[in-house]
Image (tube, coloured by chain):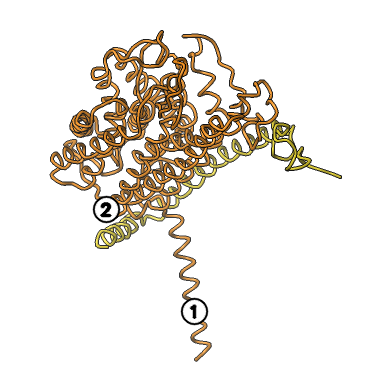
Chain colours: A orange, B yellow
Amino acid sequence: MNDELGAFTVIFTEFYYWVMIVLMFLIHVGFCLYEVGVCRPKNTLNTLMKNAMLIPVITVGFFFFGWWIYFAFQNGPGITGGWKSAPWAEPWHELMGPHMGGTAAAGMSTEDTMNWSRLNGVFWGAFLLFSWTTGSILSGAVIERIRSGAFWLLALLVGSFTWILDASWGWSDSGWMVKVLGYHDAYASGVVHAIAGGSALAILIHLGPRIGRFRADGTARIIPPQNTWLVIIGLFLIYTGFWGFYAACNIPIMDVDPDGGRAFFSATTIYLTPTTLSGVTFNFIMALVGGMLVAYFLSDGDPFWTFSGGLGAVITASAGNDLYYPYQAFFIGGFGVWCAYKLHHWVERRFRVDDAVGAVAVHGYCGTIGVIVAGFMLWGYPSSPHDDFARVTPWGQLAGAAIMFLGLGFIPCYILAGILKWVGLLRMPVEVELVGLDHLRRMEEKGQIEELVAAERQAFQDLC
Amino acid sequence: MTATGQIESWVENPLNIGPLYPFVGWEVTLFVLCFALCAAFTIWKIVHEKKQHDAEAQDLRQSGNVVDMLESAYRDYVSSKRD
């Protein structure tokens, strides 16, 4: 910050993330529209509020401990070292608020204080938007029967703890999974999507299907969305927000040759490995269209699956989209969607899992497949600028995918959802589910309308 | 003069300025208050929701008009599809 180039780099980065948060916010507008469109009219308000209120629930958890976890747990702890010090992320630290950066903050050097005073809030905000997304992914899968309080506890677990723990391990420049496994997941196939999909599957197993979802022979009945237009607009907005997420996965400007005696500025991934926003643009769009084509073909033009296919394809290609060639992104995306579509229907038939929006398929299966495929496609690539870190391998990625989907996704949520079910807090009573989760509110509104009409009738009679 | 913050002037050397917010030193207390409030909200929501829906389910069972309400919900559903 003391010279023009340093100040430009820091303030440009600050502004870049600040704008990205706006774009990322659109994904939540999309999730709300999407879920409300999918559910039946009798559950509309409950569906909306269940999703919307995960925002405050996850946010405070992320402020209290999530942000600190990201830095403190990068070594495991106990795998490649102990706890890492991260005073700027403690929930009572002076840098967790407006700070000029002129005087050194507690436990920090002057230079670190200067940089973090500009970057702490916008980094926190960008990561927080990922947290909300993990919660929203769960939210869609469980609509029309889960109790909101139980859902928020599960969303808090994933959004403020397990996802950020996996990001600390596998989505940071010195996480132990990057060091030991050579884990590479540039745009979060595993660290956001696989974990959220695995979590959703675990909850769905305990929660059970919506009443009437399956016939006696085990085949699934279709529950048509109440408003297909809302669903599609929601998915389009999720695409738009996804651009913001991609942008927020990059550090926009950094000297990528700091020891070479010359400055060479580039965008980097979160691992600080160089990439270009230009190349990533090719890959994002080519993966998207690959997925739309495959999903359109498989579903015979079903709008829900076609749009979800685009999303699933981007998620599949995301692990290596910093490095793929666009045709590779296209085919990998399409392959992921083909697998996820088939798996979704097989799991639905075989295990009677009622995933209302295909979240486990689009996020869980596509994300997991994407991480594994990247292990083969990027075999031997350095995972980090640090030469002593492991290189990308299929087995490193396979282990990483298992940690994401099963270790930090499925297992913690299976345990918590099991406890909630055991104490009778997970699912709505049958009668309430049948008449709709908005029943009480609708009865209240009906009373208000009747009273209003009576008053208007009286006013007219008084006039006459 | 009484002051809640540490800023004496906006034109002093910026390198002498740290926290910009008022009541510096109260961060831990504010954290405890905010944490307690959020924990209380969560507990209230879970307890309130359970009471509310259990009572609603009991009323519905006793009233015996779940089928009528299902019909009403069905009409809304069909009507929403027509839109």
Query: Circle 1 — which element?
Result: helix
Where is mark 2, residue-wise? A228
Residue with the most extreme front position: A262
- Residue type at mark 1? Glu
Q: Nearer the viewer, residue A436 or A24?
A: A24
Q: Identify the residue at image location x=42%, y=41%.
A: A24
- Please indicate whether residue A399 sits to the left or right of residue A90 in the image: left
In this view of the protein, can residue A369 be seen by the observer? yes
Query: Quick one: quadrant of the N terminus of chain A?
Result: top right
Question: What is the number of the mark on residue A38?
Answer: none
Contact flag, marks 2 and 1 (Cβ < 8 Å): no
Q: Nearer the viewer, residue B64 or A282?
A: A282
Q: In the rendering, at what x and y percent does residue A311 appear? A: 28, 38
Q: In the rendering, at what x and y percent does residue A109 appear? A: 65, 21
Frontmost of labels 2 and 1 is 2
- Residue type at mark 2? Thr
Can you say whether A337 is above or below A385 in the image? below
Where is mark 1, residue-wise? A456
- Please indicate whether residue A215 sits to the left or right of residue A412 in the image: left
